């Protein structure tokens, strides 16, 4: 049986506003009486949380990192996302396999064919109905985060890495029609108005 729920993914660089917008979207949808599962990668299951801790280690090889993300993702898909969609709920997920293409593929330089294959295995055919790609330049994302807190391992590797990731998202968008580019440099309110409109259209389409 194909899932009946609606699967919304937020993607974008660190500091692009994913968690800010996810929080607003989830609150808005719950206010409309929808059942909503809010999740975030990596993590979202007890196993995924343990994997998230491992991902903070400094000396991971790119391939080890790839497989840890995929392990966390497969747990999340099977234990949380697919069951919620089968119950007819809306799933709002920060990051999905698009992040792996952008960060591990374009950022770290792992072969894209390998990444596509492990992404396919880990997601088991569970595809988002819409991907909200919050587009901010690498410089701006980094600047926002540096104001708030200490950079984490990925942010530490600096701007050149994030520029490759940014390019990866743009390349990916050309091949993936479900990705909607949202200009993330505007005010949180303006961004949310657009996101709300996009998601309302998707919900209408799915209910027809
Ligand atoms: P992400 O989850 O993509 O890493 P966050 O939502 O945590 O991004 O936002 C990163 C930082 O930028 C936070 O300090 C947040 O308050 C700020 N921020 C979020 N959206 C905007 C925006 N549209 N304009 C300016 N700053 C923003």
Image: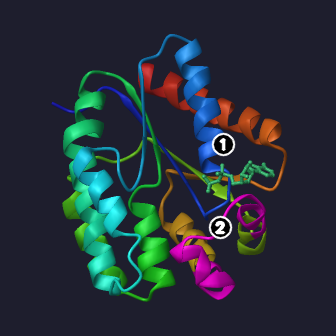
| Spot occupied by residue 100 in the image (x, y as percentages of width and height) | 41, 69
Q: CA distance from mark 1 to mark 2?
A: 18 Å
| Ligand 1 is within 8 Å of the C-beta of the residue at disc 2 | no
Please give the name of the residue rendered at 42% of the width and 72% of the height, measured from the top-left corner.
Answer: 101
Instruction: Measuring from the top left, give residue 154's x and y in whole percent.
Output: 53, 75
Give the image quarter of residue 29: top right
* Side of 99 relative to 112 (left or right): right
> Does residue 149 belong to the magenta stretch?
yes
Q: Judge whether residue 66 can be spotted in this image.
A: yes
The residue most toward the left is 1
Instruction: Left or right? Give the position of 128 relative to 33.
Output: left
Compared to residue 198, the image places residue 102 above or below, namely below
Q: Residues within 10 Å of mark 2 (few under 14, many from 20)?
A: few
State yes or no: residue 172 in magenta. Answer: no
Work out whether residue 208 can be spotted: no
Secondary structure found at label 1: helix
Q: Which residue bears the numbered disc 2?
A: 150
Which of the 4 image quarters holds residue 31?
top right
Label 1 or label 2, whichever comes before in sequence order: 1
Q: Please tell me which residue lies in front, 138 or 118.
A: 138
In the drawing, what numbered circle is on residue 20? 1
Please tell me whether mark 2 sits on a helix, a strand or a loop.
Answer: loop
Front label number (1 vs 2):
2
**In x, y percent, where is residue 12?**
59, 60
Q: Residue 196 got which mark?
A: none
> Is residue 52 depicted above or below 80 in this figure?
below
Using the rendered view, name the quadrant where residue 14 is placed. bottom right
What segment is highlighted magenta in the picture?
Answer: 143-164
User: Does the closest atom of ligand 1 sit within 8 Å of the Cβ of label 1?
Assistant: yes
């Amino acid at each position: 049986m194909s899932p009946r729920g609606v699967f919304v993914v937020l993607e974008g660089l660190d500091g692009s506003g994913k968690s800010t917008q996810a929080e607003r979207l989830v609150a808005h949808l719950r206010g409309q009486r929808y059942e909503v599962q809010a999740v975030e990668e990596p993590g979202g299951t007890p196993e995924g949380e343990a994997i998230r801790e491992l991902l903070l280690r400094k000396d991971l090889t790119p391939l080890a990192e790839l497989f840890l993300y995929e392990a966390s993702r497969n747990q999340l898909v099977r234990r949380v996302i697919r069951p919620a969609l089968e119950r007819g709920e809306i799933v709002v997920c920060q990051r999905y396999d698009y992040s792996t293409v952008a960060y591990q593929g374009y950022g770290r330089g792992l072969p894209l064919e390998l990444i596509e294959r492990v992404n396919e295995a880990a997601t088991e055919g569970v595809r988002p109905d819409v991907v909200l790609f919050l587009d901010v330049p690498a410089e701006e994302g980094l600047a926002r985060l540096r104001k708030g807190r200490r950079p984490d391992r990925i942010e530490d590797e600096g701007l050149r890495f994030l520029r490759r990731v940014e390019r990866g998202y743009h390349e990916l968008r050309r091949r993936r029609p479900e990705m909607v580019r949202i200009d993330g440099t505007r005010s949180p309110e303006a961004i949310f108005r657009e996101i709300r409109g996009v998601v309302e259209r998707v919900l209408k389409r799915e209910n027809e």
